[in-house]
């Protein structure tokens, strides 16, 4: 519990202010006066206001300013605007007031930040979808708006324990759908990783704490391995005239959990939990930096066994967000760590800062003027504007379009004449055709890709050479709307149907999954005020007693999802006002449908033993069993009825003990 001590708070505020002035050490006296003026305005504007946890509200804008200056390396303007970012929204100050005190430049950024905070849309009840339009629209005007917004979101996540649970869920869903992918797209990997871990800490607390504890227990082992790795190469690197620092970068907790789940392996079996990073102090032209990195790579692979298929070169062709580095994985040839694999990252100091702070670091190295856009983002922004411009009333569809265009690395495919076509990940042949020309898309019936013929729904990969096959009798069908991933293609198809009076037949119904659920009205307790409502268990994630859950209100029905359900995540990111805190009613004897995935070595009698464990040992009813075997291995799926997660986990443990079973996991 926070105890108010005003004298102590004044000292803390003064300490934070002095730190901001220290971080702006390169600012002129005039610029420092602007910071002091912004601090004074913010302090007076938020005077007497406290956050949910009890601390003075001014702590928040000051911390946002610190993150912008210290973590992202932004200049005095970002500090000024961070201090003022909530003033127009939450106090009596107006935008003209800010312009009159601080000038047009500051007012322009504050206007962008204020627009991004107008959440509610009375007509559509779509809170976040409208907000995301405003947030993303600001990127093309001044990137400091979105950078400050990301700093604001990071600090809100760090202090999320102080807000009510429904607000917490809304903030987390927004972060997952928009802010984490956006931080990655802008190259802010450190910020992206911390946001992911803060979300996981809340959504998957048990696994988060387990992996965190295991990482802490292995700290000394990692330090010892780092020392052993560096010893044989350090002197040779120095003899080439390079100064370098060596460190180990631990993979984020979320990344480790994701890999454990995706590959169904234990913590110990994730071999790339950390990477050894070699950062060179090389100064000069980019070609000199690249030569230095390649030289160090040659030294490393002379001493250690290189694993060629793990080699990644982002020097000559950096990622879209500016990331440059050499990555490889090597193996100890002898000694205590013989056979041990280690990921190695080689980069220069400049590359390292860009890797950690993305677009913000480009300002420091004068690649772009602060507030402007890096050239490498131009095409992505053009595509993003298409999504924003084509927004219709279906907020779920809009959010799916945003997700496709924000997440993942773009692909670059080529026409037969070598023209580059940039598309979002998972783009199809049909997307490519419409990107080249609308008429080409409308007559598309397939494509020759690298001289092989593929259908219109084939998903393209980077460097594919694509020749569209057309037909004079080909025409769009409603199913095309489920194939395309780009807004341009979707709009072209919809325009075609509109022209041909077929728009009703082409209406998308992708969100129908959200309306389907298993009715079970007696097992969920939301709150006494909601007793008149009906409850449905969502079959997309099949929650059961013991799972952390959330309710999403639709009309007179509350749909119950697991807290980490991707369908619920999208719903919460669009309709934050529909979130309802949910918990299980205690002592209810009800069964739930659960899915289990099994894999292992095939042998005679395994199926009989498996059903024996499920039906006889645990007296669990089986709804469906499917087992497929080939080449001595098998994969299977069980749909069973259990009453809670405790029994399900014990059942999984017993199945894992069966001879030949290599992995068991809940679906």
Image (spheres, helix red, strand yellow):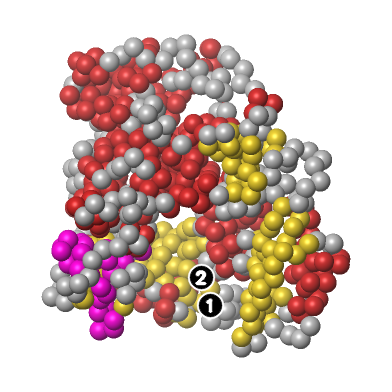
Query: Which quadrant is home to the C terminus?
Result: bottom right
Q: Earlier in the sequence, mark 2 or mark 1?
A: 1
Q: Disc 2 marks which residue?
A: 342
Q: Position of residue 421 (x, y in %)?
A: 21, 65
- The secondary element bearing badge 2 is classed as strand
Relative depth, front residue between 9 and 381:
381
Query: Which quadrant is home to the N terminus?
Result: top right
Q: Position of residue 326 (x, y in %)?
A: 35, 67
| Left or right, 159 with reference to 63 | right
Are discs 2 and 1 less than 8 Å apart at CB? yes
The magenta region covers: 425-453
Count every numbered label the image shows and give the total.
2
Q: Position of residue 593 (x, y in %)?
A: 69, 56
| Magenta span contains residue 436 | yes
Q: Residue at x 78, y 73 (%)?
A: 610
Relative depth, front residue between 391 and 249:
391
Q: Position of residue 327 (x, y in %)?
A: 39, 68
Work out whether residue 183 can be spotted: no
Q: Residue at x 23, y 66 (%)?
A: 475
The quarter of the displayed image where residue 129 is located: top left
Relative depth, front residue between 586 and 344:
586
Residue 92 lies, with reference to residue 483, above or below; the image says above
Q: Residues within 10 Å of mark 2 (few under 14, many from 20)?
A: many
| Left or right, 554 with reference to 470 | right
Disc number at residue 306? none
Work out whether residue 456 can be spotted: yes
Disc number at residue 332? 1
Estimate the spatial distance between the alpha carbons at disc 2 and disc 1, rounded to whole Å: 8 Å
């Amino acid at each position: 519990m926070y105890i108010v001590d005003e004298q102590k708070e004044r000292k803390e505020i003064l300490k934070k202010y002095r730190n901001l002035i220290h971080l702006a050490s390169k600012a002129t006296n005039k610029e420092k006066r602007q910071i002091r003026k912004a601090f004074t305005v913010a302090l007076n504007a938020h005077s007497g206001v406290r956050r949910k946890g009890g601390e003075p509200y001014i702590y928040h804008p000051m911390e946002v300013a610190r993150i912008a200056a210290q973590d992202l390396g932004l200049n005095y303007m970002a500090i000024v605007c961070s201090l003022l970012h909530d003033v127009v929204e939450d106090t009596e100050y107006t935008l003209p007031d800010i312009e009159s005190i601080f000038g047009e430049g500051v007012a322009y950024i504050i206007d962008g930040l204020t627009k991004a905070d107008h959440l509610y849309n009375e007509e559509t009840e779509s809170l976040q979808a409208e907000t995301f339009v405003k947030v993303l629209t600001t990127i093309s005007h001044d990137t400091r708006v979105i950078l400050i917004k990301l700093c604001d979101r990071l600090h809100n996540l760090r202090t999320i324990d102080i807000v009510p649970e429904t607000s917490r869920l809304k903030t987390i869903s927004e972060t997952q759908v928009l802010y984490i992918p956006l931080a990655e797209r802008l190259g802010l990997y450190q910020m992206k990783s911390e946001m992911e871990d803060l979300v996981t800490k809340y959504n998957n607390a048990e696994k988060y704490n387990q992996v965190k504890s295991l990482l802490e227990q292995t700290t000394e082992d990692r330090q010892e391995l780092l020392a052993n790795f560096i010893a044989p190469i350090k002197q040779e690197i120095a003899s080439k005239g390079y100064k370098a620092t060596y460190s180990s970068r631990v993979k984020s907790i979320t990344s480790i959990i994701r890999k454990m789940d995706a590959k169904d392996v234990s913590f110990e079996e994730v071999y790339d939990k950390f990477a050894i990073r070699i950062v060179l102090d090389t100064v000069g032209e980019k070609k000199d930096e690249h030569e230095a990195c390649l030289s160090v790579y040659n030294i490393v692979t002379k001493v250690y066994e290189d694993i060629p298929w793990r080699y990644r070169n982002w020097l000559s062709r950096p990622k879209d967000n500016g990331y440059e580095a050499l990555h490889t994985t090597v193996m100890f040839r002898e000694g205590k760590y013989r056979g041990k694999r280690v990921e190695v990252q080689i980069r220069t100091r400049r590359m390292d800062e860009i890797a950690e702070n993305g677009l913000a670091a480009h300002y420091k190295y004068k690649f772009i003027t602060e507030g402007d856009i890096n050239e490498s983002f131009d095409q992505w922004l053009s595509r993003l504007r298409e999504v924003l411009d084509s927004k219709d009333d279906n907020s779920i569809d809009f959010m799916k379009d945003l997700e496709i265009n924000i997440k993942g690395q773009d692909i670059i495919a080529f026409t037969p004449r070598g023209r580059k076509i940039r598309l979002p990940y998972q783009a199809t042949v049909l997307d490519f055709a419409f990107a080249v020309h609308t008429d080409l898309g409308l007559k598309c019936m397939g494509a020759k890709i690298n001289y092989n013929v593929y259908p219109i729904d084939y998903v393209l990969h980077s460097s594919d050479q694509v020749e569209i096959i057309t037909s004079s009798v080909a025409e769009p069908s409603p199913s095309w709307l489920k194939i395309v991933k780009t807004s341009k293609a979707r709009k072209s198809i919809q325009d075609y149907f509109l022209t041909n009076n077929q728009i009703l037949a082409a209406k998308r119904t992708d969100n129908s999954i959200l309306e389907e659920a298993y009715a079970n009205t007696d097992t969920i307790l939301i709150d006494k005020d909601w007793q008149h409502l009906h409850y449905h268990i969502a079959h997309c994630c099949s929650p059961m007693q013991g799972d952390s859950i959330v309710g999403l209100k639709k009309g007179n029905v509350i749909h119950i999802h697991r807290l980490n359900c991707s369908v619920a995540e999208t719903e919460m990111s669009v309709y934050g006002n529909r979130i309802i805190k949910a918990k299980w009613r205690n002592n209810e004897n009800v069964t739930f449908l659960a899915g289990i995935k099994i894999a292992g070595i095939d042998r005679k009698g395994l199926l009989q033993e498996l059903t024996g464990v499920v039906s006889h040992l645990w007296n669990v009813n089986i709804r469906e069993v499917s087992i497929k075997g080939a080449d001595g291995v098998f994969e299977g799926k069980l749909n069973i009825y259990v009453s809670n997660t405790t029994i399900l986990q014990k059942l999984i443990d017993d199945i894992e003990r069966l001879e030949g079973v290599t992995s068991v996991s809940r679906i």
